[in-house]
Image (cartoon, helix red, strand yellow):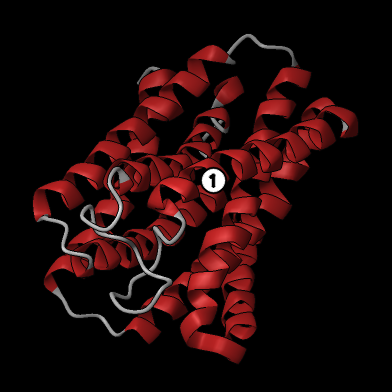
Amino acid sequence: MPGAVEAGLWGLLGGAALVLGALVAWFVRVPRTLIASVMAFGSGVLFSAVAFDLVEEAADTGGLGPTAIGFVGGALAYLVANALLARRGARHRKRSGGEGPERQPSEDEQSGSGAAIAIGALLDGVPESVVLGLSLLGGGAVSAPVLAAVFISNVPEGLSSAAGMKASGRRAGYVFGVWGGIAVVSGVAALVGYLALGDAPPEAVAVITAVAAGAILTMIADTMIPEAFERTRTWTGVITTVGFLVAFAIERLGA
């Protein structure tokens, strides 16, 4: 199988986890505490992938300088984009509840919030997909720890956000259109990442990998941990630690 096609399929698989989470949220009444717990677990898994796969791989590939530049740049880029989307109603796009001020607004409450939430969800998912494509460069296999991290974290992301969409009155066509579209774009992002950087110098690959890592880490801190802490409270750190340990074990066993 051509590497670009393989990269696209792995990206599509990672994005499909969002659709899976949305399906569960739409048809099953999942307790918010359970959603928050899985969100905390997924945060720990992503923490591990960022620390032991993405940043380490970037530093080994292109050196500390390009990695640091890309890492901070990715964090700042996500911060700016997220701030702009928050003004349009996407601040609480991962919230699963339908009550209180910290919830997703309906279209009637804030015009354009539906599009902002969709773009925000896309912003959260694309960096993860790009690194899946990058992991195949050089003829290697997809990184099992990164794939596991993306899939495990995407399920609660889709679950929590879709539950919030449903609670705010959004229709099934919108909800599954958003997550299905993001799954497809995730596959395309992984494919493009593979094609665009196939012949790039190591420093460029390191910068892009680090940009994705910085964006992912900022996304965890800005959106996933707050949603988890809202319900799990003092247990958030413990559950996140377990997720980190599971992902670290996967990385070690696959080494």
Q: Amino acid at mark 1?
A: Asn
In this image, 206 relative to 99: left or right? right
Query: Is 15 left or right of 79, judged from the image as shown?
Result: left
Where is 182 relative to 164, above or below? above
48 or 77: which is nearer to us? 77
The quarter in which the N terminus is drawn is top left
Task: Give the structural element (helix, strand or loop) at label 1.
Answer: helix
Question: Horizontal and vertical percent for residue 222?
Answer: 59, 59
Name, please, the residue furthest toward the bottom: 234
Label count reads 1
> Depth check: 253 or 31 in front?
31
Task: Find residue 164 and report its horizontal and vertical position in percent.
Answer: 29, 66
Residue nearest the observer in this picture, 126 or 197: 126
Look at 83% across and 37% down and name the residue there. Answer: 68
**Residue 147 relative to residue 186: left or right:** right
Q: Residues within 10 Å of mark 1 (few under 14, many from 20)?
A: many
Nearest the eye: 120 or 189: 120
Q: Residue at x 49, y 14 (%)?
A: 195
Vertical comparison of 240 with 171: above or below:
below
> Which image quadrant for residue 67?
top right
The answer to whether residue 52 of the structure is visible from this angle is: yes
Q: Could you tell whether 214 is left or right of 167 in the image?
A: right
The answer to whether residue 143 is seen in the rendering is no
Residue 97 percent coordinates (x, y): 32, 75
Mark 1, residue position: 82
Q: In the image, what residue occupies the spot 34% across and 67% down?
A: 160
Q: Residue furthest top?
A: 199
- Residue 120: image x %, image y %? 42, 45
What residue is rendered at 28% in x and 33% in y? 184
